[in-house]
Amino acid sequence: MHKTILWKLVAGCMLAMCCSRVQMLAQSQAATSTIAKAEASISAERIKEQDKFISDDLLEGRYPGLRGGELAAKYIATQFALEGLKPAGDNGSYFQQVNFVGMKVEPEKTTFVLEPKNGEALTLKFGDDFVVMNQTLTETTTIDAPIVFVGYGADAPEFQWNDYAGVDVKGKIILCIVGDPPSDDPKFFAGKALTYYGRWTYKFEQAARLGAVGALVIHRTDLASYGWDVVKHSNSGERTFLRDDANPRLQAASWIHLEVARKLFAMSGLDLDREFAAAGTRGFKAVELPVRLKATVTSTVRKFQSPNVVAMLLGASKVDQAVLYTAHYDHLGFVPGMAGDNIYNGAADNGTGVAMILEMARAWAESGLKLPHSVIFAAVTAEEQGLLGSEYLGQHPPVPASQIALDINYDMLLPVGVQQEINVTGAERSSFFPEVQATAKRFGLAIVPDPFPEAGSYYRSDHFSLSRVGIPAFSVDAGTLYEGHDRAWGVAQEKDYNEHHYHDFSDNFDPAWDFTGDAKLMRFGMDLGWQVIHLPKTIEWNKGDEFEAARLKSEGK
């Protein structure tokens, strides 16, 4: 009797569980069918029309703080509003206003002199020998300080490496080499690939954190992956800084030409080649040189605002596990008074990315999906000025950084056909990578590695700003293989754009462009986002990754 009752109870429970699972499966299949319909609604033609407007002459190259940039921001906000997305900016608006300061060095009033303890001083020429920016955002700063050679200027505890060990650089000028310590071991400074320790931005930041007043980064073309002319031109115009950044800053954030460094070492009785070799060994010790930098840096200062445009679809959970989609909307503006085409329209860079996230927002909003977690969209400003808009977004996210599971970024995807390959460098650094791999396979997209890992491309797009605060993040980039073409054709398309249109007046909208592939990459990103907001737990960086500590800190661990 008791056994019969017990078996009936067990059978009843099993039946209930079975029914529950069938119900859950049916709900899951219905939801999957719904997301598939939402993905299918993504239109290449709508992306094309959005790009056409975003890159129109009316928007004057979308420079931050100028009329064209403001028009672009207002247009994007209007598109979000029309789709019913919730404002996620300041004071109930779509705009997250960012305070900037533009700094333009006045070469005729800026001087750099290397003065040795013994011997003749060497006066450097702005542009040819050095470039400099005053990060303290003042009109004039004067420096008279000793120079300390700190090798590669890296403090990397995970590699048991500290170029600053045993030396005090407070109030001094650090001299360092661009790039990472040389390595063929993927587990030591990532082998041939560039880590963030090799980026000039890190070297300036670390020097400032340790109290230095200035930094001289030695340029070498093979280590930097670009020539001196890039350094010269990039630092000859206005450079933009976050006004309210609380991080320490340098009075003189500088680059010097390799031949200037050679003369500087010779003044100190040292040989540049020997010092470079020594800096790449574990036995290296920082050394103060018998040379001082005497400098005056004078700049024109311009204060302005430019907004990130941020919107979201709210999820049901109070503790979020949001997915974030980003793309920068700014470009290089225009050249007043120039004859002919004087507008940097940026149709590919990054009219494509903006058009894509606008269409993505529409597809999510009109899907009717019930979301367990939020979906956030951010069109960020001042990417061309050094990822500044996304840096501010990372420091002031619409929900806590610990509650953003993943950022997917879109930047400059040439609309020349249907991609058969993607590059998602950085995705492999997180627990979500198996899902990325499986989804790519389902979409017929082969994942290819970064073709130039030594250039450190992961640190040069807006996803990096989110990574720095612990949010797993990567960009979706195209490979070079397209449907109906061989690889040589894809390589030629990329080469032509990079050599003739990138950051040039000719990056204009082309009516013949084919946005079918960009629509495919939108569906891929939407599918990933759907998976993210349904994961049983949030995404984490792989154990030991350089961004793991920031993630754990954001989670209070």
Image: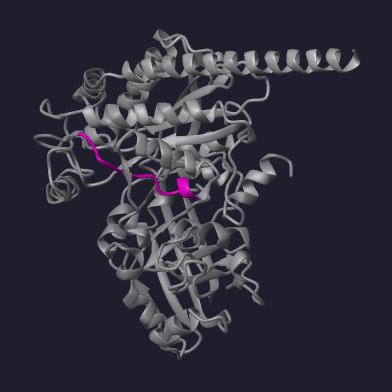
**Display coloring:** one colour
Image quadrant in which you'd find residue 396: top right
Image quadrant in which you'd find residue 178: bottom left
Residue 325: x percent and y percent? 44, 30
Q: Is 421 a magenta residue?
A: yes
Front one among 226 and 104: 226
Residue at the (41%, 88%) spot, across then down: 271
Image quadrant in which you'd find residue 56: top left
Residue 93: x percent and y percent? 51, 15
Front one among 539 and 338: 539
Magenta residues (range): 418-428
Look at the picture and state if 485 lies above or below 226: above
Residue 165: x percent and y percent? 64, 74
Residue 206: x percent and y percent? 57, 60
Front one among 414 and 104: 414
Q: Does residue 242 appear anywhere in the picture? A: no
Residue at the (61%, 27%) spot, across then down: 399
Residue at the (27%, 19%) spot, across then down: 43
Q: Is 340 a magenta residue?
A: no
Front one among 331 and 139: 331
Instruction: State the quadrant of the C terminus.
Output: top right
Q: Does residue 440 appear anywhere in the picture? A: yes
Question: Most extreme residue toward the front, as rendered?
Answer: 1
